[in-house]
Image (tube, rainbow, N blue to C red):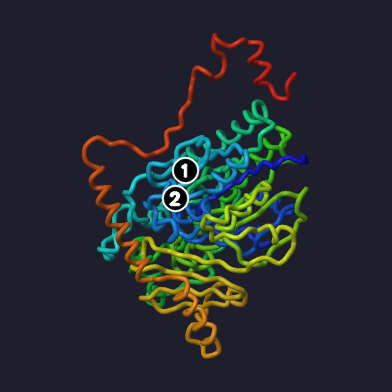
């Protein structure tokens, strides 16, 4: 390990439910040996959360260290402003090469947000077409999730998602090879963001066949639809499951494919770690693994994400730097919003005190010291008609919306969140304290109006831009073929010598 600033390899999975993983459940049947190896020698956060259980808002918060309400990150078509500092901006100022291979779901014309390079395009659109509409809460747009992902679950040969992740990891590994050959003296922060195990629930036979039907655990906690909380009932309508049931065999196949997709991600983790080590970068690189949110996978009768229950909101988080931090586990609740200040601290930099930041550095936790134990969450997208907040602190999780009954769970004693304590006489003082904290933290009426105005603007602009000539905001990776491989303006011997690693 050298004295210079460490490299950072940040690996992200999409929609990976932490409670299911062997990382947190030793009896889990999911096979993830490469992640388990990182965890064995790393720091594992057993209570890590996203700050909004939906792709774009979660990712905007993750890269910026700010809550969605501070940056307009309301839904999957929210514009992410170009003047919001990200960890990529911070690290570039510290001399890092910053690159992104894969998904970050940036919406709007800025598709870099501090990354010096994006090695691939994104898997999802960058325009405003997926804006939520609180003006018509009972209308179900065609682009909402439906249950086809469950009903059509099973093995495959190829999918759109496989195409994407294969390119993401190929380009990331090539970036590492190019780095060690061309810029070995400059530290890098490479973010590799894959789309698995996000639905649709299908995976090649190589990973499907790792499991048998009898290996698959079915949902442990199912609720009748009329017993669900109002937000969960709205979500059932969002995903077109209201008044319907899923065949048990479809649920089993979906969960088996999800297991396989987790193993697929693990295989890619293994490939990336092998490339690091092959290039002699392992000792100087901090590896961080996390995700954007989880997946209900049929628990409580719900699917996908969009709620604050553990399966949807908890994410895996591992920081592997055995030369810097002793292996241990952290029980305190933290969130992905904490990664920006953590990356800056790991790089030996300092935060700009004049800039807004909600996240807090995980460095005390990494050093085995006492750190914060709190997660603040906001959700303002599909299934809502006003903001839905979450506070996780100590053993408790509190979920609040002005229009819905309050939810209060002792997650430590009730990890399945079966018992709502909001009306328990023994918990009234705690509930009232949480209600008072919500009122202190948020001006809900103002935020509601802000979200509604943003939705209306974006719907108007999207309708206008759909007319006439299309100018896409989707990121277009540029390749200069004149500088690839062997060309006549290059000296062949010099090229072969520069391209070979280790150099002869």
Residue 30 appears left or right of 364? left
Mark carried by residue 416:
none
**SS for tag 2?**
loop
Residue on which disc 1 sits: 161
Q: Name the image quarter holding residue 304.
A: bottom left
* Residue 257 visible in this rendered orientation of the protein: no
The answer to whether mark 2 and mark 1 are in CB contact below 8 A is: yes
Residue on which disc 2 sits: 200
Residue 352 percent location from the top left of the image: 57, 52
Q: What quarter of the picture does the C terminus occupy?
A: top right
How far apart in space, not on screen, are marks 2 and 1 (Cα)? 9 Å
Residue at (62%, 42%) from the top-left corner? 94
Label 2 packing within 10 angstroms: few (<14), some (14-19), many (20+): many
* Residue 130 visible in this rendered orientation of the protein: yes
In-front residue for pair 113/104: 113
Residue at (57%, 14%) from the top-left corner? 486
Label 1 packing within 10 angstroms: few (<14), some (14-19), many (20+): some
Q: Name the image quarter holding residue 159.
A: top left
**SS for tag 1?**
helix
Work out which residue is located at the far bottom of the displayed protein and give it. Answer: 425
Residue 308 percent location from the top left of the image: 48, 67
Q: What quarter of the picture does the N terminus occupy?
A: top right
Residue at (49%, 84%) from the top-left corner? 432
Residue 306 percent location from the top left of the image: 43, 62
Residue 176 appears left or right of 398? right
Residue at (59%, 42%) from the top-left corner? 93
Residue 464 percent location from the top left of the image: 23, 45
């Amino acid at each position: 390990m050298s004295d210079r600033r460490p490299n950072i390899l940040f690996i992200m999975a999409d929609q990976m439910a932490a409670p299911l993983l062997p990382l947190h459940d030793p009896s889990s049947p999911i096979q993830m040996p490469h992640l388990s190896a990182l965890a064995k020698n790393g720091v594992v956060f057993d209570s890590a959360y996203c700050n909004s259980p939906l792709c774009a808002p979660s990712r905007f918060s993750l890269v910026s260290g700010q809550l969605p309400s501070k940056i307009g990150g309301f839904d999957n078509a929210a514009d992410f402003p170009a003047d919001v500092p990200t960890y990529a901006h911070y690290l570039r100022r510290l001399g890092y090469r910053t690159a992104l291979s894969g998904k970050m779901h940036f919406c709007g014309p800025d598709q870099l947000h501090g990354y010096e390079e994006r090695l691939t395009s994104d898997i999802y659109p960058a325009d405003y077409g997926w804006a939520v509409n609180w003006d018509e809460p009972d209308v179900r747009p065609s682009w909402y999730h439906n249950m086809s992902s469950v009903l059509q679950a099973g093995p495959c040969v190829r999918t759109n998602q496989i195409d994407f992740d294969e390119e993401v990891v190929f380009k990331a590994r090539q970036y590492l090879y190019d780095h060690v050959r061309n810029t070995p003296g400059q530290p890098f922060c490479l973010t590799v963001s894959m789309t698995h195990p996000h639905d649709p629930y299908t995976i090649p036979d190589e990973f499907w066949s790792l499991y048998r039907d009898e290996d698959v655990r079915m949902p442990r906690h199912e609720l009748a639809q009329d017993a669900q909380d109002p937000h969960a009932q709205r979500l059932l309508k969002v995903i077109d499951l209201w008044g319907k049931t899923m065949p048990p065999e479809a649920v089993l196949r979906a969960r088996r494919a999800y297991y396989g997709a987790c193993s697929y991600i693990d295989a890619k983790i293994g490939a990336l770690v092998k490339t690091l080590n092959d290039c002699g970068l392992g000792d100087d690189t901090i590896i961080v693994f996390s995700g954007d949110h989880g997946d209900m996978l049929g628990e409580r009768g719900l699917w996908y994400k969009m709620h604050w229950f553990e399966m949807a909101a908890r994410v895996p988080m591992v920081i592997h730097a055995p030369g810097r931090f002793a292996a241990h586990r952290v029980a305190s609740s933290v969130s992905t919003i904490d990664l920006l200040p953590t990356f800056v601290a790991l790089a030996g930099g300092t935060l700009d005190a004049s800039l807004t930041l909600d996240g807090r550095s995980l460095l005390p936790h990494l050093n085995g010291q006492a750190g914060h134990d709190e997660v603040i969450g906001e959700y303002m997208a599909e299934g809502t008609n006003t903001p839905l907040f979450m506070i996780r602190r100590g053993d408790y999780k509190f979920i609040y919306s002005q229009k819905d009954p309050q939810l209060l769970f002792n997650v430590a004693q009730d990890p399945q969140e079966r018992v709502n304590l909001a009306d328990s006489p023994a918990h009234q003082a705690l509930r009232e304290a949480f209600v008072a904290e919500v009122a202190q933290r948020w001006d809900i009426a103002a935020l509601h109006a802000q979200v509604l105005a943003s939705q209306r603007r974006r719907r108007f602009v999207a309708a206008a831009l759909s007319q006439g000539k299309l100018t896409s905001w989707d990121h277009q990776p540029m390749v200069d073929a004149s500088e690839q491989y062997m060309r006549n303006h290059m000296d062949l011997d010099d090229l072969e010598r520069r391209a070979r690693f280790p150099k002869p």
